[in-house]
Image (cartoon, rainbow, N blue to C red):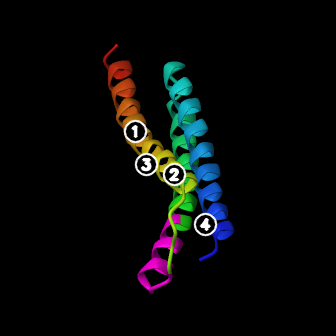
Amino acid sequence: MEQEEIQVVAFEIILHSGTARTNIHDAFKKMRENNYEEAEQLLDEANQEITLAHQSQTDLLQKYASGESINMEIIMVHAQDHLMTTMTLKEVAIEMLHLYQKVNDAV
């Protein structure tokens, strides 16, 4: 696989995970405003972006598994890090949404 192709995949992962991260932070804001429906919608949108990023990652892994040589570049390491931290942040946001709702219901 050419260096340029790897860079394109890396930037796709960064783009989609970055959009997801923005949606997650917007969801946190909606949670603080007790707007849980919009928070859930933003988390769903974040998940769609994460799925797109993950698909780019999976396509690369499939090429590697089929024997294609992949030279890892620092931009791909950065992209993978970006995706994984965004996925973790989404999981935290889902838990926070449940906690916000539970606290709000108790009041």
Q: Position of residue 76 (x, y in %)?
A: 54, 56
The answer to which quarter of the image holds residue 91 is top left
Regarding mark 2 in the picture, which secondary structure is present there?
helix
Q: Where is the N terminus found, in terms of image quarters? A: bottom right
Badge 4: few (under 14), some or many (20 or more) residues near its Cα, within 10 Å?
Answer: some
The answer to which quarter of the image holds residue 2 is bottom right
Badge 3: few (under 14), some or many (20 or more) residues near its Cα, within 10 Å?
Answer: some
Q: Position of residue 47 (x, y in %)?
A: 51, 51
Three-letter code for the amino acid on which mark 4 is drawn: Ile
The residue labelled by disc 4 is: 6
Regarding mark 3 in the picture, which secondary structure is present there?
helix
Q: Residue at x 42, y 35 (%)?
A: 93
The residue labelled by disc 2 is: 47
- Extreme-top residue of the structure: 107
Check if mark 2's residue and mark 1's residue have beta carbons within 8 Å.
Answer: no
**Label whose residue precedes the other's in the sequence (2 or 1):** 2
Q: Position of residue 83 (x, y in %)?
A: 49, 50
Q: Is residue 37 magenta?
A: no
**Label whose residue precedes the other's in the sequence (4 or 3):** 4
The residue labelled by disc 1 is: 94
The residue labelled by disc 3 is: 84
**Label whose residue precedes the other's in the sequence (1 or 3):** 3
Three-letter code for the amino acid on which mark 1 is drawn: Ile
